[in-house]
Structure formats: C-alpha cells, structure tokens
Amino acid sequence: MHANYQTILYRNMQFDFTLAEKFLTKGKFHDRVLLEPYVNRLVSEFGALETPASKDDLKRHFDMARQSELRLDGYRCQLLLDQAQAI
C-alpha cells in the first residue's frame, strides 16, 4: 500500500475524491468494524473518533470539501508528489 500512495492520492485528486468517497461509503470494506484495540490506539494516539462517521456525515464532508477553494488540485500538486516519490 505504501508504495502506491502517490498514485492513489493523485487519482483521487484527479477525480475530485469521488474514488475515496465510493470506497468509504460503498466499498467492500465500508461495513467492517475495526477491532477495539485498534480503535483505542487510534483514539488515544491520534485523536480519532470513537465511533465511525455515518455515511451521511461522510457525504456532507466530501460535498463541503468540493465546494471549498482549499481543496487539493492534482495539477498544482504534481511537483510535491514528484518530490515525495524521490524521498
């Protein structure tokens, strides 16, 4: 997975993050429950939510991000992606 992050990120930026949205709301893993020890670690070390966001919440966040001027743009970010690959 780590070796492909640049391609995954770039493809998501190209398609305005619809790929990520589909994965999170309709993908084959969308209804799986993370084991409690992993949830606890994500909450304690990274401030993650204890309960997953609902599909409606995710859709709302993706919609808001698409309307924002602060969203990522694959064309403008290509230099950064190329630099990250070199590391």
Image (cartoon, grey):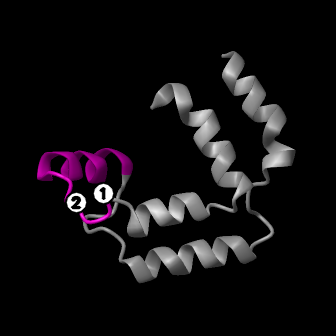
Q: Residue 45 shows which numbered tag?
A: none
Query: Quarter of the image containing the C terminus?
Result: top right
Considering the image in quadrants, where does the N terminus appear? top left
Residue 45 lies in the magenta-colored region: yes
22 and 63: which one is in front? 22
Q: Nearer the viewer, residue 44 or 70?
A: 70
Left or right for 55, reference 68: left
* Magenta segment: 29-46
Query: What is the secondary structure assignment of the residue under circle 2?
Result: loop
Q: CA distance from mark 1 to mark 2?
A: 5 Å
Q: Residue furthest top?
A: 87
Q: Are marks 1 and 2 in contact (CB under 8 Å)?
A: yes
Determine which residue is flagged by label 1.
29
Q: Position of residue 12 (x, y in %)?
A: 64, 52
Quadrant in which residue 53 is drawn: bottom left
Report the residue at 38% width, 61% height from top. Answer: 27
Q: Quickly name the residue at label 2.
A: 32
**Residue type (three-letter) at the residue carrying disc 2:** Arg
**21 lies left or right of 56:** right
Q: Residue furthest left?
A: 36
**SS label for mark 1:** loop
Numbered label tally: 2
Q: Is residue 87 above or below residue 40?
A: above
Q: Is residue 85 above or below residue 54?
A: above
Please give the name of the residue rendered at 44% of the width and 79% of the height, measured from the top-left corner.
Answer: 57
Q: Residues within 10 Å of mark 1 (few under 14, many from 20)?
A: few
x, y (%) of residue 11? Answer: 66, 47
Compared across the picture, whether 87 is left or right of 49 comes to: right
Query: Residue 85: x, y in percent?
Result: 68, 22
- How packed mark 2 is, by other alpha carbons closer than 10 Å (few <14, some 14-19, many 20 or more), is few
**What type of secondary structure mainly makes up the magenta span?**
helix
